[in-house]
């Protein structure tokens, strides 16, 4: 392989070689491979109180939280930073809800990256073939998978 030879010749470090392999391998990774399953996702209800959002964010360590409707669909996304920076702080969560990008479980992870970048969002809802929500994937999840050695 070119990368192995380049490493032997000193043109590439072992880390650089591993990253190149990860980029190539990433083409075979799906959103399902990278997503956080719904059972591990901290989410909000559309009627969640602002105080609850802060508590959930602190306890989970996440600053972007999906909003899940009564039917189990992802209806939006809340970035806690939006609330913290707002001087007025209305009582309604809907004031802070952003649209959510949806990706199919079997969709290539590289395409999920493109969708998130195009939408300027850091989190996408992952759905199965029947459009049931199965998890979420974040930009951080995708990048971590891409650069892991």
Image: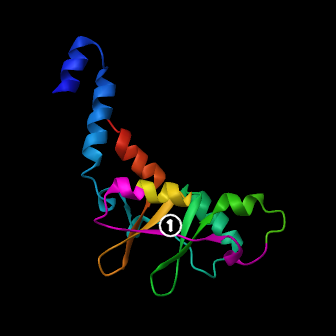
User: Which portion, as a residue range, is magenta?
Assistant: 90-112
- Residue that extends furthest to the top in the rendered view of this protein: 9
Residue 128, image x, y percentages: 31, 74
Residue 74 included in the magenta stretch of the image:
no
Q: Residue at x 50, y 66 (%)?
A: 42
Indicate the quadrant where residue 13 lies: top left
- Residue at the disc numbered 1: 42
Q: Quadrant of the N terminus?
A: top left
Please say if 147 is above or below 6: below
- Residue that extends furthest to the right in the rendered view of this protein: 88
Q: Which of the pair 87/9 is nearer the observer?
A: 9
Q: Which of the pair 86/107 is nearer the observer?
A: 107
Please say if 96 is above or below 79: below
Q: Secondary structure at mark 1?
A: loop
Residue 134, image x, y percentages: 36, 72
- Residue that extends furthest to the left in the rendered view of this protein: 1
Q: Residue at x 59, y 57 (%)?
A: 63
Q: Residue at x 57, y 59 (%)?
A: 59
């Amino acid at each position: 392989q070119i990368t192995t030879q380049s490493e032997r010749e000193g043109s590439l470090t072992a880390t650089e070689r591993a990253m190149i392999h990860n980029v190539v391998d990433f083409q075979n990774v799906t959103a399902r491979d990278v997503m956080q399953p719904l059972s591990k996702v901290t989410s909000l209800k559309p009627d969640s109180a602002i105080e609850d959002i802060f508590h959930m964010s602190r306890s989970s360590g996440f600053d972007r939280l999906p909003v899940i409707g009564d039917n189990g669909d992802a209806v939006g996304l809340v970035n806690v930073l939006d609330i913290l920076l707002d001087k007025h702080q209305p009582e309604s969560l809907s004031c802070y809800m952003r649209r959510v990008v949806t990706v199919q479980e079997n969709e290539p992870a590289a395409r999920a990256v493109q969708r998130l970048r195009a939408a300027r969002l850091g989190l996408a809802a992952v759905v199965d073939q029947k459009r049931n929500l199965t998890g979420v994937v974040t930009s951080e999840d995708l990048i971590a998978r891409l650069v892991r050695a």
